[in-house]
Amino acid sequence: MPAVPEAPPRNLWGLDRDRLVEVVGTLGLRPFHARQIQAWMYARGVLHPALWTDLPAAAREVLAREHVVDPGRLVPGDAAPDGTVKYRVGLAAGGAAECVYMAQGARVTLCVSSQVGCALACEFCLTGRMGLARHLDAGEIVGQVAGVARDRGLGTRPFNVVFMGMGEPLHNYDGVVAAVRLLADPGGFGLSRRRITVSTAGMAPAIERLATEAVRPRLAVSLNATTDETRDRLMPINRRYPLERLLAACRQWVERTRERFTFEYVLLRGVNDGDDDVERLAAIARRHRAKVNLIPFNAVPGWLPYLPPPDERVVEIRDRLLARRAPASIRWSRGRDARAACGQLAVLPELP
Ligand code: SAH
């Protein structure tokens, strides 16, 4: 049977330059037109082909007729008192993702989801209660960024993107790496790759693979416990990649990239906040020359059976780490009141 040429995708949003070159090729356009389309969609946020004035009129007409540019529909939620806003993004392919806008002075950070739900089922995280519905593709991930950037009027102001919303980014490796490339592409969103951080619950082989990527984000590793016994209990992924294996991947990251990374550590009262835990955490951080980001647990009453330590204890833990020459900071959670904080993202029928 003769090969039937594949129809070009209807939704242009999320296509990278190479895919756009293919699409414009079918219209008799030249590769540089792909770059122009990319600039309209990602850099300028102009989503209707009829307005892409530097393309030939006939091509604009065909593009407008046969394609759509659909980054997903944004539904803003309430703003928390600290200015954090959680958005729900209705996806063109169905379902919804959540994305969080945070501003601290001039510093703006968008926290994006990489999956609808999550397969890893960490005990302290609400998203885990959803199970995994599906991976998001690159367009659905950068659609969250574009939608929120537009709603907040960020224009050409630089911002940070952290993959710390719903999902385990390295479980959706291809989608996330493609999204990182689009975000860092100078012809696309044009963010410095240093402004992009991927956070993982500890998928060791994927950390090693990420270290070899040409366009590499920054890395954050959710350590959350310093013994296999506790980590096994909190994070089922630890049974597959125990601490030894995870830390070996972290060392490989540093060796290959010559870049430091961050350990995130969710503080759970009476579970991982003892003096012994802090000693071990300091030793691990020092050995890997990594920074520690302490996250006091964000509660979701009725859903997650944990408490954060008292604030004084959180500060004391940070000071102990610093005294042991382990760089540490506290992520006082933002947006708790809008259920927009770390570990509180989920689309569950029983929740508002
Ligand atoms: N799956 C990835 C990214 C999403 S979670 C990961 O695990 O890194 C982003 C951060 O929020 C992780 O460090 C996670 O440990 C933390 N977290 C999850 N649930 C939390 C909760 N209820 N309170 C505070 N932090 C939480």
Image (tube, rainbow, N blue to C red):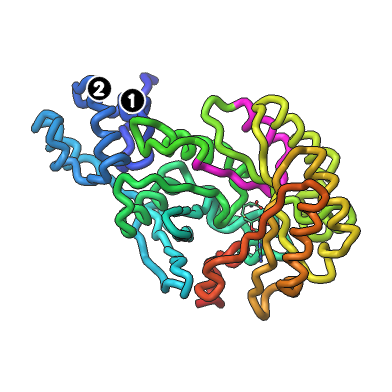
What amino acid is found at the position of numbered circle 1 in the picture? Answer: Pro
**Residue 233: in sight, yes or no?**
yes
Q: Quadrant of residue 152?
A: bottom left
The span from disc 2 to disc 1 (Cα, nearest Å) is 23 Å
What amino acid is found at the position of numbered circle 2 in the picture? Answer: Phe
Residue underneath mark 2: 32
- Nearest the eye: 13 or 124: 124
Find the residue positioned furthest to the front: 323
Q: Secondary structure at mark 1?
A: loop
Q: Disc number at residue 5?
A: 1
Q: Quadrant of residue 46?
A: top left
Indicate the position of residue 124 as horizontal and vertical percent values. Answer: 71, 65
Find the residue positioned furthest to the left: 57
Q: Which residue sits at x=58%, y=58%?
A: 117
Indicate the position of residue 313 as horizontal and vertical percent values. Answer: 77, 69
Give the label, 2 or 1, closer to the camera. Answer: 2
Queried whether the magenta region covers residue 255, the answer comes back as no
Q: Earlier in the sequence, mark 2 or mark 1?
A: 1
Indicate the position of residue 226 as horizontal and vertical percent values. Answer: 84, 52
Crowd tier of the residue under label 1, counting other residues whose Cα lies within 10 Å: few below 14, some 14–19, many 20 or above: few
**Residue 306: in sight, yes or no?**
no
Q: Secondary structure at mark 2?
A: helix
Q: Which residue sits at x=40%, y=55%?
A: 91
Is the C-beta of the residue carrying label 1 under 8 Å from the nearest atom of ligand 1? no
Which region is colored magenta?
195-212
Q: Is residue 156 left or right of residue 349?
A: left
